[in-house]
Image (cartoon, rainbow, N blue to C red):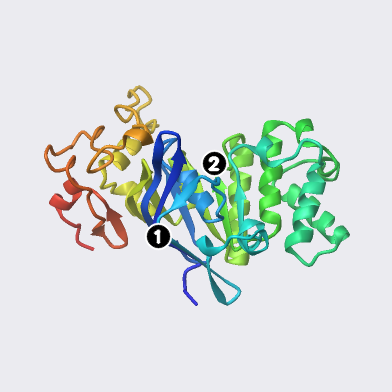
Amino acid sequence: MSESLIKVENLTLQFKTDEGLITAVDDVSFEIAPGEVMGLVGESGSGKSVTAKSLMKLNPGNAVYSPESKITLSTDGRDIEVLSLNTASDLKVVRGGAISMIFQEPMASFAPAITIGDHMVEQLLLHTDLNKKGAADLSVEMLERVGISEAGKRFNQYAFELSGGMRQRAMIAMALSTKPKLLIADEPTTALDVTIQAQVLELMKELVAEFGMGIIFITHDLGVVAQTVDKVAVMYLGRLVEQGPVREVLHHPAHPYTQGLMDALPKLEDLDAPLTPVAGDIPSPLERPNGCVFHTRCPKYIAGRCDAAEPKPFGVFTDHNVSCFVAEDQGARVA
């Protein structure tokens, strides 16, 4: 069995549309070990959520995976090829079993006519050996652990009776209650105030330590990334442009896009400094640029090179890779 919890190799995903095939994820590779937390960052439209949903084969029916795409989940002493799973019973192992996902929009995760408690109990009966009372007790406990007051009362309420932040916490509790091997957290703290956000992040760290759970943390918040993840992957228009240990990437960003994301952060040491956004807009997937996908916005763009060929991953430091001709020309830093 592989030492990785999940290994993604050459993942390319296109969607069939009336306009033709649209590439959403392009030749993405990464792996996560048990107990490891990976941050996946990038602008909206970069392909982060589509990549994450591929790990559970949750993308819609018009999704087309390339023949080279491979996702291997290692759990319970066996390797599972996720993209080869087709039936609902086969997919149960990656949908709420070994893998759980916290979605961006909590209202989309709860049926309006079913109580929060019934949602949680149903999935625990499906994926664990607990009886109904044990599932209810664990559900209330998890609601308490994510900071929901009067958890027993909330357990019997409907999603529309809760505030947005409370719905978000209930969804996090539901995803964590099955104690998955891998948790995909898609902007899990967006609707939370900073106090509850810190509480939820601390809970995730505890579960990683307690159960050796791996986490993919999708977020725009580089502050959360710096405090939470072990390694970070930067995504732009479906491609991973840089990945490596979080402190290495954030302290020494090698790709111009990563540098732009860092420059766009407010500077607490200079509150009068203007914000510096990444220039331009992310192109439409229907109009993917040739060569490096970032060259249309890149301040270091090399004419005749960046627009002619796709840069391959290049090692700039230990376990720190970047796909950029400029970084390649500058050479690797000495480890």
Badge nearest the viewer, 2 or 1: 1
Of the numbered discs 2 and 1, the one sitting upstream in the chain is 1
- Position of residue 147 measured from the top left corner of the image (x, y, whole percent): 71, 44
Q: Going by the image, does 231 lie left or right of 278?
A: right
- For disc 1, the neighbor class at 10 Å (few under 14, some 14 to 19, many from 20) is few
Residue at screen point 23% across, 37% down: 295
| Viewer-nearest residue: 14 or 9 | 14
Query: Which residue position is annotated with label 2?
Result: 187
| Mark 2 → mark 1, Cα distance in angstroms | 30 Å
| Viewer-nearest residue: 248 or 20 | 20
**In the displayed image of the protein, which residue is found farthest to the right?**
133
**As drawn, 73 above or below 37:** below
- Position of residue 13 measured from the top left corner of the image (x, y, whole percent): 42, 49
Residue at screen point 42% across, 44% down: 41
Looking at the image, can residue 323 be seen?
yes
* Total labels drawn: 2
- For disc 2, the neighbor class at 10 Å (few under 14, some 14 to 19, many from 20) is some
Type of amino acid under label 1 = Pro
Query: Which residue position is annotated with label 1?
Result: 67
Q: Going by the image, does 140 lie left or right of 280?
A: right
**As drawn, 239 above or below 108:** below
Residue at screen point 15% across, 55% down: 331
- Position of residue 180 measured from the top left corner of the image (x, y, whole percent): 63, 61
Looking at the image, can residue 227 be seen?
no
Q: Going by the image, does 186 lie left or right of 306?
A: right
- Position of residue 195 measured from the top left corner of the image (x, y, whole percent): 62, 38
**As drawn, 301 above or below 87:** above
**As drawn, 263 above or below 240:** above
Q: Quadrant of residue 159?
A: top right
Residue at screen point 46% across, 55% down: 38
Q: Secondary structure at mark 2?
A: loop
Type of amino acid under label 2 = Glu
